[in-house]
């Protein structure tokens, strides 16, 4: 996966998720979602360059609704 992007359901969740991951030692960056056919969300996502699967698990455990994890390089 080139650039793993975690799609969340709201900008609030994206901001809370970034803070939660930082507290757990996982770097995350808030980014605009690239145009994706058939995907919805708040327009923002979390770019997590490393430990993405662990980040998704932590977000879900915290009650943050993760919509999908996509490859931001090719939008697939």
Image (cartoon, rainbow, N blue to C red):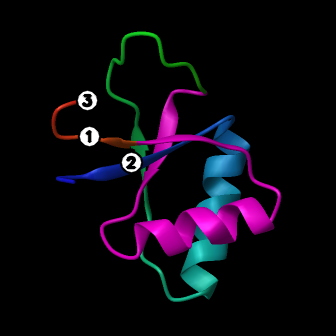
Q: Is residue 32 left or right of residue 60?
A: left
Identified at 59% across, 25% down, the residue is 41
Task: Residue 5 in the image: state x and y as whole percent.
Answer: 39, 48
Identified at 32% across, 27% down, the residue is 34
Stretch of the chain drawn in magenta:
42-69
Q: Which residue is mark 2?
A: 5
Identified at 40% across, 31% down, the residue is 33
Q: Is residue 29 left or right of residue 65?
A: left
* Residue 37 colored in magenta in the image: no
Task: Residue 22 in the image: state x and y as whole percent.
Answer: 55, 79
- Which quadrant, please, contains the C terminus? top left
Task: Residue 25 in the image: state x and y as whole percent.
Answer: 51, 89
Q: CA distance from mark 3 to mark 1?
A: 5 Å
Q: Which residue is mark 3?
A: 75
Q: Residues within 10 Å of mark 2 (few under 14, many from 20)?
A: many
Q: Is residue 59 left or right of residue 44?
A: right
Cβ–Cβ below 8 Å for labels 2 and 1?
yes
Q: Which label belongs to residue 72?
A: 1
In the image, 52 versus 31, the foreground residue is: 52
């Amino acid at each position: 996966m080139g650039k793993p992007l975690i799609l969340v359901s709201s900008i609030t969740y994206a901001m809370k998720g970034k803070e939660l991951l930082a507290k757990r030692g996982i770097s995350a960056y808030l980014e605009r979602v690239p145009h994706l056919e058939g995907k919805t969300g708040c327009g923002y996502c979390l770019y997590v360059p490393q430990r993405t699967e662990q980040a998704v698990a932590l977000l879900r455990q915290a009650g943050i609704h993760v919509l999908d994890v996509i490859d931001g390089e090719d939008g697939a």
